[in-house]
């Protein structure tokens, strides 16, 4: 049976975290995660096993280039390059693949991974080999019925045949392994009471579509097995017609997809956690693919840059953020930390580089670039940044406060260094005015006045010295002139 409704997580980038890869490793069916350009980002082990492809021959390559060309299927190109881009989700799409062993019938379910701006960030693709089921479900002439019944009964899929009024007419032997009921028990009681109430309406609409000749679509719904446990069945339906072409019955082919549904829920949970982290972060965060195009961006980053998500995702970062030096000059590519990290995979931190806003203004930003690696291969990068304007203003205010403190300290020193010699000069001058001084005393008073005047001159001279003068000294957290007398 083709895998049913693929519930994909919201993509934040085209990389797959180790947690998501662990989820893929639990899947028992072939499953691919494709980038927007249809390169294989990750694959479940079942994909490698079923199609005989080694992991290193798959990761990073275009889906159509896998193997020896057997994946170059025109119908598959139509599905991935046209249909899913128009509808976002396509289910039960069957293609034929030619391979050395013959022809396979493959059923594909594809879901686009949404990104900001409505552009698909990638695709989830579930693939199933339905060759045996196609043979089993093919209408056979009456004389071939026993052989068809043998094929159906030995199939691992659950095959159910209903009349138009919903009466169960046939159940394959696999009912015992999937539901715990023998075919005879199901024929006696029917399957209606096994339906989960929450899925009954969707199931009945699904059945009616098939009865009216609608295109077979995949549906995953819950049922109760013999042990009373709730399991998920993934089913497809097809109408069965009589010789006149009238629809007389509906055939359902199903498989237990409980494990897959649990894996999808785990993927959704991981995606929600990543989205919550991005949306609650106080810093701007954006992701880049290997080519430097933005794959995701959080709301804080959009606010700081003055942009909307739809105009950012999918565009090259250097066209959006207008990185430049602090003096406004252009930043050469060889000096761009983001470009260098995308090239060599080394993390980098940058202090006060200018980011451009949508309105043409710029702001200083401190940012860190961390490479995104997949098996040692660089697949992109994540940039975390913050507006450094507030920090720069705080540092400027701190420097001004220190400067004012230094001025205050210098003023005190000037007062001390000038007042002392000035007081001595005035005292000597007053003595000179007094009569009765000997010539020797007067000479000593004049010499003292000259000495104190020179001391004042030296203090004034040191006040005029430049900031790189050796007379500058640290006083606490301030730098001020050393106005004390040199020895």
Image (cartoon, rainbow, N blue to C red):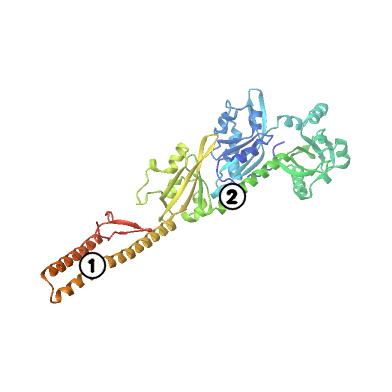
Q: Is residue 313 visible?
A: no
**Place of residue 30 in the rendered image (x, y in percent of width and height, measured from the top left):** 66, 34
Front position in the image: 243 or 112: 112
- What is the quadrant of residue 19 in the picture? top right
Element at badge 1?
helix
As drawn, 103 above or below 389: above
Locate residue 27 relative to residue 362 in the image: left or right. Answer: right
Front position in the image: 387 or 162: 387
**Place of residue 389 in the rendered image (x, y in percent of width and height, measured from the top left):** 42, 57
Q: Is residue 87 visible?
A: yes
As drawn, 449 above or below 317: below
Q: Which residue lies at the image location 49% right of the left edge and 56% below the top edge?
A: 303
As drawn, 402 above or below 241: below
Locate residue 445 relative to residue 249 in the image: left or right. Answer: left
| Residue annotated with mark 1 | 421
- What is the quadrant of residue 67 in the picture? top right
Q: Residues within 10 Å of mark 2 (few under 14, many from 20)?
A: some
Which circle marks residue 404 in the picture?
A: none
Q: Which residue lies at the image location 33% right of the left edge and 65% below the top edge?
A: 408
**Place of residue 34 in the rendered image (x, y in percent of width and height, measured from the top left):** 58, 38
Element at badge 2?
helix
Q: Residues within 10 Å of mark 1 (few under 14, many from 20)?
A: some
Lower sequence index among marks 2 and 1:
2
Contact flag, marks 2 and 1 (Cβ < 8 Å):
no
**Place of residue 294 in the rendered image (x, y in percent of width and height, measured from the top left):** 50, 45
In the image, farthest residue toward the top: 100
Q: How many marks?
A: 2
| Residue annotated with mark 2 | 275
Q: CA distance from mark 2 to mark 1?
A: 73 Å
From the image, state whether disc 2 or disc 1 is nearer to you: 1
């Amino acid at each position: 049976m083709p895998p049913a409704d693929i519930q994909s997580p919201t993509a934040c980038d085209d990389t797959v975290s180790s947690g998501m890869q662990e989820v893929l490793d639990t899947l028992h069916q072939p499953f691919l995660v494709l980038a927007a350009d249809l390169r294989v980002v990750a694959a479940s082990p079942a994909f490698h096993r079923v199609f005989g492809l080694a992991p290193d021959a798959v990761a990073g390559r275009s889906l159509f280039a896998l193997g020896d060309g057997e994946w170059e299927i025109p119908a598959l190109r139509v599905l991935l390059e046209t249909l899913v881009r128009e509808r976002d989700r396509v289910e039960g799409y069957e293609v034929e693949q030619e391979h050395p062993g013959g022809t396979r019938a493959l059923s594909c379910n594809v879901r686009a991974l949404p990104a900001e701006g409505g552009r698909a960030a990638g695709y989830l693709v579930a693939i199933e080999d339905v060759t045996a089921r196609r043979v089993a479900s093919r209408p056979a002439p009456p004389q071939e019925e026993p052989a068809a019944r043998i094929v159906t009964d030995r199939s691992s899929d659950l095959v159910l045949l209903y009349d138009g009024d919903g009466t169960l007419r046939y159940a394959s032997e696999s009912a015992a392994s999937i539901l715990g009921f023998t075919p005879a028990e199901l024929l006696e009681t029917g399957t209606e009471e096994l339906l989960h109430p929450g899925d009954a309406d969707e199931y009945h609409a699904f059945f009616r579509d098939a009865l009216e000749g609608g295109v077979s679509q995949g549906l995953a719904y819950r049922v109760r097995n013999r042990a009373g446990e709730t399991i998920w069945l993934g089913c497809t339906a097809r109408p069965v017609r009589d010789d006149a072409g009238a629809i007389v019955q509906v055939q359902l082919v199903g498989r237990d997809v409980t494990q897959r549904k649990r894996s999808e829920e785990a993927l959704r949970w991981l995606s929600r956690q990543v989205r919550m982290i991005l949306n609650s972060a106080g810093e701007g965060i954006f992701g880049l693919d290997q080519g430097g195009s933005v794959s995701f961006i959080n709301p804080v980053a959009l606010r700081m840059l003055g942009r909307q998500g739809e105009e950012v995702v999918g565009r090259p970062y250097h066209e959006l953020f207008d990185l430049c030096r602090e003096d406004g000059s252009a930043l050469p590519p060889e000096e761009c930390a983001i470009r260098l990290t995308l090239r060599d995979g080394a993390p980098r931190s940058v202090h006060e580089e200018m980011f451009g806003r949508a309105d043409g203004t710029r702001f200083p930003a401190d940012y860190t670039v961390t490479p995104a690696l997949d098996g040692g291969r660089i697949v992109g990068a994540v940039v975390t940044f913050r507006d450094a304007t507030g920090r720069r203003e705080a540092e400027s205010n701190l420097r001004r406060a220190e400067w004012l403190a230094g001025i205050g300290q210098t003023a005190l020193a000037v007062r001390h260094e000038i007042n002392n010699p000035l007081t001595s000069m005035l005292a000597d001058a007053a003595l000179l005015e007094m009569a009765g001084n000997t010539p020797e005393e007067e000479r000593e008073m004049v010499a003292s006045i000259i000495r104190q005047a020179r001391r004042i001159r030296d203090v004034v001279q040191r006040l005029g010295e430049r900031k790189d003068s050796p007379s500058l000294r640290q006083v606490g957290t301030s730098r001020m002139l050393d106005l004390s007398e040199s020895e």
